[in-house]
Amino acid sequence: MNPDALPFDADAMLAGLRDWVECESPTFDPAAVNRMMDLAARALVLAGARIERIAGRMGYGDCVRASFPHARADVPGILLMGHFDTVHPVGTLAALPFRRDGNRAWGPGILDMKGGNYLALEAIRQLQRAGARTRLPVTVLFTSDEEVGSPSTRDLIEAEAARHKYVLVPEPARPDGGVVTGRYAIARFNLAATGRPSHAGAALGAGRSAIREMARKLIEIEDLTTDDCTFSVGVVHGGQWVNCVATTCTGEALSMAKRQEDLDHGLTAMLSLRASSNDVQFTVTRGVTRPVWEPDAGCLALYEQARAIAESLGQPIRAQSAGGGSDGNFTGAMGIATLDGLGVAGAGAHTLDEHIEIDSLTYRGKLMAGLLATLD
């Protein structure tokens, strides 16, 4: 089967993808995520899949698992894995509407990772229309909380991956068009400062500001950054009334390292942080962690197969490890042959300039189809 002969149509794909992009689905709005899952589930059913809807947990949205009929349904097959939650709150379409200009299209979540999910589904449909049977059974798993570290779905992801031989992840392509064969370790931390209240106008000196303590610690945390392990504080919430010395302030920090031992050292440093004085309190608790995924022989063999297909399409790809976690961290760390970064090309993920290169829907779709058809 020659994937280049499959009639992928970028304009038709973009029209279908638009419906998904305009169904906003931020992680912390489970009802919105579930509306997106409804669209995806319908498309999968129409493609002939058997659907299982998995109820959300911990306040997150549902997941969808889809199995396609296969003569060898009992053998370990291919897991296509993606997420439908985005970082963009409902209403972002006002500032980032779906639009097209030349070979680019914009919209919330279009790159990370609705475009990749859509081309994966289109690859399945194209193989069906061509009468091409995959050598292994194919399962699709769409999840709902990847953008916050997959706290409610990690066990589901790992259990599903353990039943498969390969995992394909259509997260965005690397900036040079490459794919991902490894990812750095990532840890999240919850921060909490507690001060002493007072009237900010009448008795300022009697109070101890939790916001001030958090500001001190923010600088201390980010100054822990080295070439081997980075630290950043991305969320801070504090205070309620401007005329009150703030009693509480909370935050979230992120650490990333190329090696697990470097992340472990970072974990120790973060958990050792203490309050600046006895008048205030400061605590750090560990949040979700993504393990280091380092490429092994199975992963590299999978990449070589993808590389050969990409070269036949005139779109050579490089393998690389990447920062920024994905659910591929989990499956790769399990030792399951995983290939990530198989989604669309583009830029601006998580910003109001998030966009894709439209023609990548077709050539990356063909790459995905070629993998699905030839993996055994």
Image (cartoon, rainbow, N blue to C red):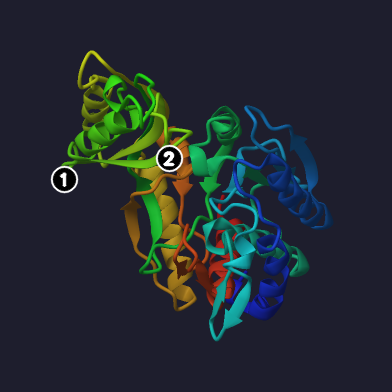
Q: What residue occupies the far front of the structure in this picture? A: 202
What's the residue type where badge 2 is placed? Asn
Residue at numbered disc 1: 227
Q: Amino acid at mark 1?
A: Asp
Coordinates of residue 159 in the picture (x, y in percent)? 58, 29
**Residue 61 location (% of width, % of height):** 68, 38
Q: Is residue 84 above or below residue 129?
A: above
Q: Residue at x 41, y 59 (%)?
A: 179
| Apparent side of residue 141 relative to residue 214 in the rendered image (left or right) | right
Q: Percent position (x, y) of residue 342? A: 50, 59
In the image, 199 versus 259, the foreground residue is 199
Residue at horizontal 64 percent and vertical 48 percent from the top: 136
Residue 142 in the figure: left or right of residue 304: right
As drawn, is 339 to the left or to the right of 124?
left
Q: Which residue is mark 2?
A: 329
Mark 2 nearby-residue class (10 Å; few <14, some 14–19, many ≥20): many
Mark 1 nearby-residue class (10 Å; few <14, some 14–19, many ≥20): few
Q: Is residue 72 visible?
A: no
